[in-house]
Amino acid sequence: MHAHAHDGSEHGHRHGLGGATGILGAAVVATLVLVAAEFAAGYAGHSMALTSDAVHNLTDVPTLVISWLAMRWALRPPTHEKTYGYHRAGILAAFVNAMILALAALFVIGESVTRLRHPVEVGTSLMIWVSLLALAINGGITLAVHRGRRDLNVRTVWLHNLGDALSNIAIVVGAVAIRWTGAQWVDPILGIAIGAMVLWSGQGILRESGHILLEGLPREIRLAKVATAVLGVPGVQEVHDMHIWTLGTDLHALSCHVRIPDMHMEDSERVLENIRGVLARDFHITHTTIQFERAGLPAEAGLYMPAPVRSSSK
């Protein structure tokens, strides 16, 4: 017996992503305005911190555009060619975004080191006012996407803009310090700190998205626990060839072979429903492909977990 099922959580996932696409579209426009302002102010005020932050914010543009496109693709239904739909589009976008973050961070750090060797006097007034404008824009985007950050792609945008907002605060503080002390080295040090922060925030996204693209086990799930839960369903004798992977953020899939004794069709249907209920309730796995094997047939090669031996009373 072979059964394949998924519930309405997929529709809810698409509905949640739909609300975020409009926010990301507005964020693209706001970020472009901010980048232009920071580049102009960085050039006029000779500020490496502002210029570096402009480069950093410029990387937000492809990040936001890719994320926006990925979310729109994720809303598309499955097709004959894309039988799982486009849920992986968001994961792929998160991976590409993380690579962009790493490259931008290395550029910022390199330019800041050069500025440390050759200090230039900066215009602190421009640094303060433009950074406050950037803080308002980046802080607004961070708050706007905060509720949807469970999605890996949205979390990339959330982390990116949160880091931008924190760097804006640091630039304001640095500008005040330069104005009061005349220490021009504060500006490139801020550039190095911003770059290091970007590297730190991006590596987690890169690692997680890569794990999903390689069909890794969802990090919050333990294979042995899932198998034990299935074995606890009355009528289940053995579980093997169990595979669990992620289709998209918060959307997991499972396939396995389950050994059951000979029984009527309606009884096996009841066992199947109980298995699916356990998987959905305890592990939030709703996209399942379960194949039954009758007792006495040889087990397939692969992950093999026999049911625990229970002592019988005489």
Image: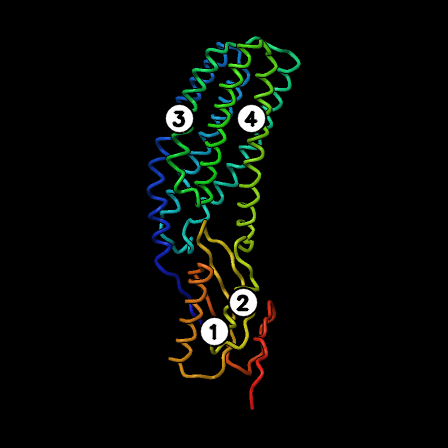
Lateral position of residue 99 relative to residue 79, left or right: right
Which label sits on residue 227? 2
Q: Amino acid at mark 4?
A: Ile
Percent x, y of residue 293:
50, 77
Q: Amino acid at mark 3?
A: Ile
Few, some or many residues within 10 Å of mark 2 (<14, 14–19, 20+) = many
The residue that disc 1 covers is 233
Few, some or many residues within 10 Å of mark 4 (<14, 14–19, 20+) = many
Disc 3 to disc 1: CB gap under 8 Å: no
Q: Amino acid at mark 2?
A: Ala
In this view, 299 is above or below 107 = below
Name the quadrant of the C terminus: bottom right
Residue with the most extreme right position:
117
How many marks overall?
4
Which label sits on residue 137? 3
Lateral position of residue 9 relative to residue 183, left or right: left
Give the alpha-carbon distance from disc 4 to disc 1, as whole Å: 52 Å
Q: Earlier in the sequence, mark 2 or mark 1?
A: 2
Percent x, y of residue 63:
46, 34
Q: Earlier in the sequence, mark 3 or mark 1?
A: 3
Q: Identify the element where label 3 is drawn.
A: helix
Snapshot colouring: rainbow
Q: Identify the element where label 4 is drawn.
A: helix
Viewer-closest of 126 and 23: 126
Q: Quadrant of residue 40?
A: top left
Give the alpha-carbon distance from disc 3 to disc 1, as whole Å: 53 Å
Disc 4 to disc 3: CB gap under 8 Å: no
Q: Quadrant of residue 148?
A: top left
Percent x, y of residue 193:
58, 25
